[in-house]
Each structure stands twice: as C-alpha cells, then as structure tokens.
Image (cartoon, grey):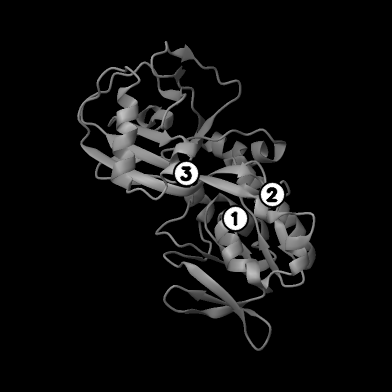
Amino acid sequence: MKRIAIIGAGLAGLTLARRLESKAQITLFEKSRGVSGRLATRRLGEFEFDHGAQYFTARSSAFQKFIAPFISEGLVQEWRPKVLTLAEGEKPDRRDWFEPHYVAVPRMSGLCKVLAGYLDIRLDEPITALGKNADNQWQLHSAETDIPEVFDWVISTAPVTQSIALLGEHLDSSILDHDIDIKNVSMSPCFSLMLGFEEAIDLPFQAAKVKNSAIDWIMVNSSKPGRADKPTLVIQSNNAWAQTHVDKESQWAGNAMLEALDKLSLNPLPTPLVQSVQRWRYARVEQALEQDALLDRKNQLGACGDWCLSGRVEGAFLSAVGLAQQLELSL
C-alpha cells in the first residue's frame, strides 16, 4: 500500500483521508492542538466560541449528500437567526438568507472531530520542510525533529501561501508555469473578537452584516442550535481593514473593533467576563485557483483546500473530493 502524508487536519485534509483510507496508508500532520482548521471552536473557561467559520451552505449535490447523514443524526442543524444589515448613522435593514445556513452541533469543530475518528493524526506537529531519501521517498521534517516514517505522496491542505512554501521548490516547474498562475491566488486575513457575558445581552438580531466599518459580521454565537446558555458574541473584522492592520497586536485590534461596535448605536452591552482575539492570517479567498486541486504526478505531490475553489467550507470539501478522484488513478 502506498503511504500518503496529508498536511493539515481541517475539513479538506480529513475528507481526503476518508476518501483514500481504503486505498493507501494515511497519516495526517496538524500543527495545532486539535483538528478542524477554520471550523474551529475555542473554549475560554465556561464559554465556547466558534471563532472561525460561523456557518456553511450546501449548494452542490455532492456536499448535500455528504452532510445529509449528519443532519439526520442532529450533528448538523440549520441556523435560522434574525439577520440585520447595520451601518453607522443608518437605520438597520432586515437581511434575508435565501438558502439554508448550517452549523455543526454542539460546536463547529464537532463535524471535523467526528470525521477524524480513528484516523492516524499527529497533533502539535508543524511540518516545515520536505526532502527525498536514497530510495526516492519523501522524508518530512517538523519544527523540532525528523519524522521517522517515509511517504510515497505528500499532500498539503494548508492555505496557499503555506502550501507553496512547503511544496514549491519540489514541484515540477511546468506545474507552476502552466496556464495555472498560482501566484494570483490570494487570501486575506481576519480578526475574530470573542466576548462572553454573565448577564443577558439585548441585541435586535442574532447575526448582523456591518457596512463601512472595521467590523464585517456580528454573531450571537450562543443563539446557534445546541449551544450553552451563557451569552457569547463573535465579532469578525472587515478583511480589508484586517489586511491593513494584520501585524498589530491582537489587543489593539480587539479594542478598535469594540470602538467600531460602539458607533453602531446598539443597546449597551454588559461588561464581558472574558474577551479574546484570534488573528486569522488566511481567512478569506480573494482569488481562487479555480480548479479542484494542484497535482504533480511526477513528484507525487499535491495540494487542495478552499483556496482552490470558492473559499467556502463547501469549497474545501469539493477540492478534497476532486483531488481524491485524481489520486485514485495513481494508487
């Protein structure tokens, strides 16, 4: 059986592993302490926050089929919040969602944790470099040591910048110089501000899109199905604003977002018991690769992820499925 190393244990990496587990020996390497990537949930004391992707949609028949059993089991549920559009000095407008928006229950990371199941996943293992051994097999190097196993294939599901940094020097030049111009693929950052309250919060919405502000979205995280009763807010920044301030300290970004929140003339919030900020350097796909995945059969390397397609959660799944279909021909 061929041995495949998959870098990243978010939805793309886990989907790819599940699709190929009967055809190859799979090991996943994840730099974080847990699986899920941007389908992430953070626990701060007695509070939990979905501080990455807030929800997902299902527009393709393949993704609809994938989530159907999870919906039947109650692990995935539709979120039906009251949604407003807000702007400083303007009257709020009702915003309609014209398609189902789903969340994993009881937290967004739950879906990936189920997919992870019994897979061989090495957590806290950032892969920093690749090399070939004398038998022309891939050797992986982590931040602290060399990985003892060797692999026939290496697939990165990390964001495009990190994937190319890892694979780039080893890829067939024709892959990068072909009509695929990977240099045009771009992702923008985001800050997520998490606020947890002891007292109830009085807001006229459960989700709000904000215009002309440092803030892009406000979500009453505790309003999602299956969440704990403790009131929680997740406030996500505008991507262009985050790009300008991406290297500022997280505390500065959080304070700036609170100032922007104050300008929206909402009811005053109680003092939060917990407050934290997450900087996502690669949050939104501004320009996608516009094909399922990157595949170098000659060197047995590949990459997939949401940056290949739409940038949405569904895009990560479809990219992994597309790459799995291509890889099956070589296994």
Q: Identify the residue at horizontal 28%, vertical 37% (top origin).
A: 255
Secondary structure beneath label 3: helix
* C-alpha gap between disc 3 and disc 1: 16 Å
Res 253 quadrant in image: top left
- Return the mark for residue 243: 3
Image quarter (top left, top right, bottom left or bottom right) of the C terminus: bottom right
Badge count: 3
Give, as a three-letter code, the residue at label 3.
Answer: Gln
In the image, residue 299 above or below residue 11 = below
Q: Identify the residue at horizontal 79%, vertical 59% (top origin).
A: 178
Image quarter (top left, top right, bottom left or bottom right) of the N terminus: bottom right
* C-alpha gap between disc 1 and disc 2: 9 Å
Label 2 vs label 3, nearer the camera: 3
Q: Identify the residue at horizontal 51%, vertical 31% (top origin).
A: 77
10 Å crowding of disc 3: few (<14), some (14-19), many (20+): some
Give, as a three-letter code, the residue at label 2.
Answer: Leu
Secondary structure beneath label 1: helix
In the image, residue 43 above or below residue 198 = below
Are discs 1 and 2 less than 8 Å apart at CB?
Answer: yes
- Return the mark for residue 181: none
Of label 2 and label 3, which has the lower sequence position?
3
Horizontal arrangement in the rendering, residue 222 relative to residue 318 (left or right): left
Of label 1 and label 2, which has the lower sequence position?
1
Label 3 vs label 1, nearer the camera: 3
10 Å crowding of disc 2: few (<14), some (14-19), many (20+): many
Q: Which residue is mark 2?
A: 289
Q: Identify the residue at horizontal 21%, vertical 31% (top origin).
A: 198
Residue lying furthest bottom: 134
Are discs 3 and 1 less than 8 Å apart at CB?
Answer: no
Q: Which residue is mark 1?
A: 160
Are discs 2 and 3 less than 8 Å apart at CB?
Answer: no
